Amino acid sequence: MNFHILTLFPEMVMNGLLTSITGRAVTKGLLSIEAINIRDYAYNKHHSVDDYPYGGGAGMLMQAEPVYQAYESVKKKINKKPRVVYLSPQGATFTQHMAEEFAKEEDLVLLCGHYEGIDERVLEEIVTDYVSIGDYVLTGGELPAMVMVDTISRLVPGVLHNDVSAEFESFQENLLEYPQYSRPEVWHEKKVPEVLLSGHHAKIEKWRREQSVIRTKQRRPDLLQKCNLTEEEKKLVDKM
Ligand code: ADE
């Protein structure tokens, strides 16, 4: 999968994303991540990419043309019209389900705004999806783009060590992940739950599922409505 990030701060996104798991996936050739500097497409001699908004108001806006030319450079390179995500607090809130959908794309363009935003006309022309990472306002779209690349990348086959890890985890079936333990068996006088030392796989699975249900009820009760709980599990949460 190929990510193309249109940004005024290419080093910010590349430094973050070429680290750890996503960086390793790039080295292995499972992903490509490129940052396109919108400033390289500034058409005036000062290389400025922002201007005052018509009608007045606070701050500066990113101009349409440099953003458009940066997008065109990607389109020309990949020889097709890609899906283009504009990161904005006005977008639909990013979810695991959306990540699964985006992971099916061969190429994905992520457009990062800065200042007070981007001239509406270029957004109308190139953007296919408006995505927010939550109801708060950041200084730019770079961190949200990095969040999206990270989340989508780990769904690409081979990026995680075993494909099972992406399956049994938070938000699978709208349940949170069960608690996990590693050595030592006793730490600060807390013992690892006995069932996990039993080697009895069916019992372990049953315990983990139950813990997931309990944890979801305690920490994210809003998710439970979307879960397929058994009758027994429904009784368990009703008792809590
Ligand atoms: N840009 C600024 N704030 C944002 C947010 N919450 N999500 C996506 N893009 C943003």
Image: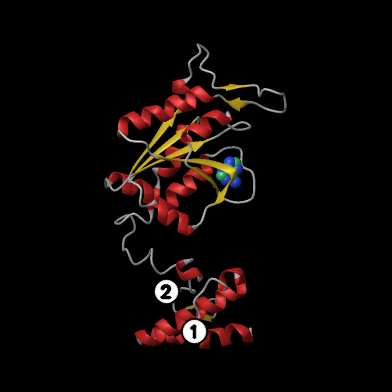
Compared with 169, 131 (above or below) is above
Q: In which quarter of the image is the C terminus?
A: bottom right
Compared with 91, 212 (above or below) is below
Amino acid type, mark 1 = Thr
Residue 32 picture location, percent across and down: 33, 41
Disc 1 to disc 2: CB gap under 8 Å: no
Compared with 223, 92 (above or below) is above
Q: Does the residue labelled 1 lie within 8 Å of ligand 1?
A: no
Q: Is mark 1 on a helix, strand or loop?
A: loop
Residue count near mark 2 (Cα–Cα under 10 Å), binned few <14, some 14–19, many ≥20: few
Which residue corresponds to the image point at 37% horizontal and 56% vertical from the top-left?
155
Kindly report which numbered mark, 1 or 2, lies closer to the viewer in this rendering: 1
Q: Is residue 208 visible?
A: yes
Residue 187 picture location, percent across and down: 50, 76
**The quadrant where residue 88 appears:** top right
Which residue corresponds to the image point at 56% horizontal and 50% vertical from the top-left?
92
Q: Does 223 sit left or right of 195 as displayed? A: right
Q: Does 120 sit left or right of 185 as displayed? A: right
> Foreground residue, 50 or 9?
50
Amino acid type, mark 2 = Arg
- Image quarter for ligand 1 equals top right
Q: Is mark 2 on a helix, strand or loop?
A: loop
> Foreground residue, 198 or 132?
132
Residue wearing tag 2? 183
Look at the image and name its color scheme: secondary structure
Residue 152 picture location, percent across and down: 41, 52
Q: Can residue 196 be seen in this view?
A: no
- For marks 1 and 2, the one nearer the N-term is 2
Residue 189 picture location, percent across and down: 54, 80
Residue wearing tag 1? 230
Q: Which residue is most to the top?
A: 45
Picture mark count: 2
